Image (spheres, rainbow, N blue to C red):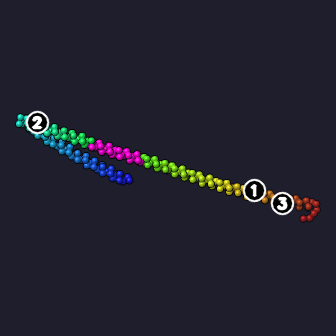
Amino acid sequence: GNAGGDGRQDQAAEALRARVDELTRAVAKRDAAIRALQAEREGAPASAGAGGGREVLLSRIAHLEAASAAAARQHESQVRELVDKHEAEIKGKEERFADLAAKRANEHRVSLKRQKDAYGELLTKRNEEHRREVRGLKDQLEGVEERQRVFLESYVEASLDALARVRDGDEL
């Protein structure tokens, strides 16, 4: 998409350069003709044909100057149109780029939120699993403690019975 746009922009820029070169050559040619006419006028005697030659030269100079001014205005107008066109294209591309950048940033934010939510769910699930595991270990520990307590109570009871029998003279 972008390469085609850049190619068209390059072609338009090249066409603009060619037109500027063409108009520059025309202005240079006109300036050379004006200089030649002025040189002829300055080199012509003051009484050449009772002023008829001088008037023709002045008329030609005026005509060339008017044509040159018109060509310059046309050239300036064409250059302004091309500059405006390219500025509008650049502005459009900048706006599209800004829109794309905003869209990508939003997509990135959404993606990060999804990842954060998924990670939060994973942690919640893992915490619940750990709670169940700890409850199970506590239950096992309570069971072991209960068996030890019963064993110790039985042992103490048996020991006290044996001690009482020995005191009473009974043999074990």
| Contact between labelled residues 1 and 3, with CB atoms less than 8 Å apart | no
Q: Nearer the viewer, residue 28 or 50?
A: 50
Query: Where is mark 2, residue-wise?
Result: 55
* Chain part drawn in magenta: 78-97
Is 79 colored magenta in this rendering?
Answer: yes
Q: Nearer the viewer, mark 3 or mark 1?
A: 1
Residue 126 counted in the magenta span: no
The answer to whether 57 appears left or right of 71 in the picture is left
Mark 2 falls on what kind of element? helix
Q: Residue tagged by mark 1?
A: 142
Q: Is residue 81 in sight in this rendering? A: yes
Which quadrant of the view contains residue 28? Answer: top left
Question: Residue 36, position in %: x, y?
Answer: 13, 42
Q: Position of residue 120 (x, y in %)?
A: 59, 51
Q: Residue at the spot x=16%, y=39% of the render? A: 63
In terms of image quadrants, where is residue 53? top left
- In the figure, is residue 59 to the left or right of 15? left
**Quick one: 41 or 106, which is closer to the camera?**
106
